[in-house]
Image: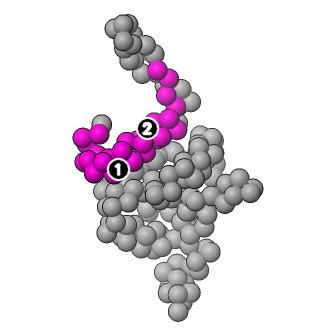
Amino acid sequence: MGSFVSTLLGGGEAQAATEVSGSPSEPSRVIAFHSSNRWQLHFNSSKQLNKLIVVDFAAAWCGPCKFMEPAINAMASKYTDVDFVKIDVDELSDVAKEFGVQAMPTFLLLKQGKEVERVVGVKKMSSRKRFSSTGKPLNMLLSSSDILLIILELNFISNKFKLPYSDVI
């Protein structure tokens, strides 16, 4: 019966949601959706859970998206309590439009159906001014993957200590 329902909703299980390949020895935990209906079912069911979802809006032709893929796969392996999802904007343009995606890659962090953070584009290195203990400016270089890791760590801390996300940042 499950395959019948899947067929009605836009394709079989293997067609609708697949795992993006990680390393040859270990499969990736990133779920790639190929059906808007299947994505909608997953998204709607996630609204009932207090679980973070990282959605990677990408395109097959996008160089920066390919650049970020190993980092996303590594994060998915490390943060097993977070769902990692990949949406191809050309394949599921309706989903990309629903979330207002205008550049790639765009990473949305969703919790209970609500956007808690958005990281747009890939900057190999972006500088941020910080101050050292002596009060002198200190340049910190952060990549997009570093920013995502920081956000995921903040989410982990907020869950571990039962703090609202906004209190952690």
Residue 97, placed above or below residue 72? below
Q: Which residue is mark 2?
A: 150
Other residues around mark 1 within 10 Å, as few (<14) / some (14–19) / many (≥20) = few
Give the magenta part as a residue range: 140-168
Camera-side residue of 51 and 40: 51
Picture coordinates of residue 120, whole percent (x, y): 44, 40
Hey, which residue is sitting farthest right in the picture?
24
Q: Is residue 97 visible?
A: no
Cα distance between the residues tagged 1 and 2 = 15 Å
Residue at x-position 36% and y-position 12%: 133
Residue at x-position 53% and y-position 65%: 33
Classify mark 1: helix, strand or loop: helix
Picture coordinates of residue 45, whole percent (x, y): 37, 71
Q: Is residue 166 magenta?
A: yes
- Find residue 160 and name its label: 1
Q: Is residue 125 magenta?
A: no
Residue at x-position 36% and y-position 45%: 157
